[in-house]
Amino acid sequence: MIRWHAAHPPGAVLFDMDGVLVDTFDAWFEVLKSCRVRRGLSPIERAEIRATWGQGIRADCESFFPGERPESLALEYDLAFAEHLDAVKAEPGVVPTVRRLRALGARTAVVTNSPVALARRIVAGIGLADTFDAIAGGDEVRVGKPEPEIVALALARIGAVSESAVLVGDTVLDIAAARAAGVVSVGYKIDGADLRIEAIPELLGLFGGR
């Protein structure tokens, strides 16, 4: 049963990052390609990245960099990503929508399988560094999405409970993590969630469209 409607909006809105707040696919393609070339590994195809999109850095170690430690790869990602920040763009309507949600009293957080330091850099790059109450990254938990640990971490950091929150995501990993954490899922251009939206500003409908 969907709990949210305009008269009783959620107290917290959690956002996945890649594919929801920002379009980072082209940048990640270049980062993973360069990291593999540096190790003398075979070139990677765009389809391979798309098939594993959002899986997180620990899974990346298993899929693309066997034997690599997540901590070392996180640092390498951060340095490599800095070279491709110009390829990162905010999803349409994200910046005004997040700011409006805050103005309406919602607490906001980023819940991403990407390393937290890199997430902070990307969020700052689209002008929202001071707008989110917290950022939870995949390198801060034992297992990222689809497990619920990272969602619980974000909720704890913003002082919210699962019953008062929604999680906006664009993959089955996001939906599964939300469900496991007892949070209402909002699918961004994806079916299978409790709610579906085609544009980020539609989230304001939970608050009466204000």
Image: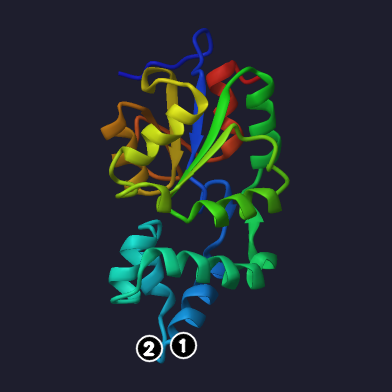
- Percent position (x, y) of residue 111? 46, 42
- 148 sits to left or right of 79: left
Compared to residue 117, the image places residue 106 above or below, namely: above
Disc 1 crowd rating (10 Å Cα; few below 14, some 14-19, many 20+) is few
- Observer able to see residue 124: yes
Residue for point 29% across, 77% down: 66
Where's the C terminus, which quadrant? Answer: top right
Question: Which picture quadrant has residue 121?
Answer: bottom right
Question: Which picture quadrant has residue 86?
Answer: bottom right
Labels 2 and 1 touching (C-beta < 8 A): yes
- Percent position (x, y) of residue 162? 37, 23
- 165 sits to left or right of 67: right
How far apart are the alpha carbons under marks 2 and 1?
A: 6 Å
Residue under pointer 1 = 37
Q: Nearer the viewer, residue 49 or 140?
A: 140
- 18 sits to left or right of 67: right
Q: Secondary structure at mark 1?
A: helix
Q: Secondary structure at mark 2?
A: loop
Residue under pointer 2 = 41
Amino acid type for the residue under numbered disc 2: Leu
Residue for point 53% across, 20% down: 206
